[in-house]
Image (cartoon, grey):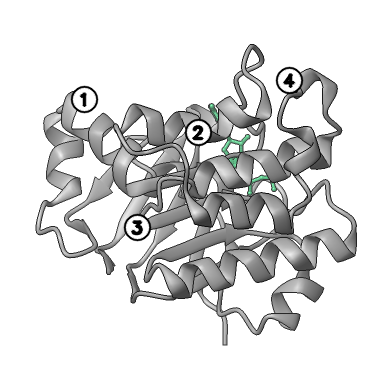
């Protein structure tokens, strides 16, 4: 479902230069992988590169799902139109700031990705996710009137509403209590398996990661940055 050759991404310059290195990655349908490592090592950078939001300094090939389109080639040709289409159709983002639109209520924030793709805004899966995560009473509220945890849960439902091939989630449980975190992890895992998608989830919560027996991509600090490798 996901095949990526060696990836290098560079942030900053001079003494502040930090290189994130991933020797390669293969995910099959139903895989959910946790990305773990210390603050500042490059976990968000890795997600952003996999989400086609950053141009890597090295990447030979990157394919996603049944499509044979080489996303690495698209990145190099800077075909912004094609990249934007893939981001909105095949990828689901739950980034650290949540990214909810402040002028839309919860209902409209959640339905936006499906609306933009011309899909019916009513989806049984979205309704189910909203019910499990307790969002139903909040549908008419705007983000400013939500708690941080409520915003995080809304952002998660928005990230999966269009049923992407790959979900990229940055600390999805950071603002949630242990019980809500467990509910969200369980929901992500069941969706990933049911929809035959894959998920990469940055998490500091080793307890949750262990509880769900998630395979891990762990960071090792190097002199100029950080390398991510499967943790044994
Ligand atoms: N926009 C940017 N420009 C330059 N350097 C950046 C930028 N964003 C992040 N960095 C640097 O890149 C490195 C990796 O940052 P990143 O946010 O990916 O780490 P992280 O592991 O996700 O951290 P945290 O767990 O604290 O969120 C850090 O040294 C950071 O200072």
Instruction: Assess disc 1: are there few (<14), some (14-19) or many (≥20) residues with their C-alpha within 10 Å of its C-alpha.
Output: few
| Lower position in the chain sequence, tag 2 or tag 3 | 2
Residue for badge 3: 165
Q: CA distance from mark 4 to mark 2?
A: 14 Å
Reading the image, the residue beneath label 1 is 80
Contact (Cβ within 8 Å) of mark 2 with mark 3: no
Q: Secondary structure at mark 1?
A: helix
Which image quarter has ligand 1? top right
Residue 178, image quadrant: bottom right
On the picture, is 179 further left or further right than 18?
A: right
Looking at the rendered structure, the secondary structure element under dot 3 is: loop
Q: Image point 62% across, 26% down: which residue?
A: 100
Number of numbered discs? 4
Q: Which mark is residue 111?
A: 2
Do labels 3 and 1 touch, CB within 8 Å?
no
Residue matched to label 4: 142
């Amino acid at each position: 479902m996901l095949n990526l050759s060696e990836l290098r991404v560079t942030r900053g310059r001079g003494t502040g230069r930090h290189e994130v290195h991933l020797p390669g990655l293969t995910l099959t349908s139903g895989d959910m992988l946790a990305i773990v490592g210390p603050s500042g090592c490059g976990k968000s950078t890795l997600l952003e590169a996999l989400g086609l939001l950053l141009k890597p300094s090295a990447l030979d090939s990157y394919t996603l799902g049944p499509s044979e389109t080489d996303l690495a080639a698209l990145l190099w040709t800077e075909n912004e139109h094609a990249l934007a289409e893939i981001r909105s159709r095949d990828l689901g983002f739950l980034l650290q700031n949540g990214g909810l639109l402040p002028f839309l209520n919860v209902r409209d924030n959640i339905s936006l990705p499906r609306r933009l793709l011309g899909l019916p805004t009513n989806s049984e899966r979205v309704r189910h996710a909203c019910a499990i995560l307790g969002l139903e009473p909040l549908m008419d509220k705007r983000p400013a009137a939500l708690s941080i945890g409520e915003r995080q849960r809304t952002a998660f439902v928005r990230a999966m509403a269009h049923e992407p091939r790959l979900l990229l989630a940055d600390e999805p449980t950071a603002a949630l209590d242990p019980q809500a975190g467990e509910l969200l992890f369980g929901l992500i895992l069941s969706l990933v398996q049911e929809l035959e998608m894959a998920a990469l989830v940055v998490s500091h919560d080793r307890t949750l990661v262990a509880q769900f027996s998630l395979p891990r991509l762990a960071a090792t600090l190097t002199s100029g940055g950080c390398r991510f490798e499967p943790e044994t």
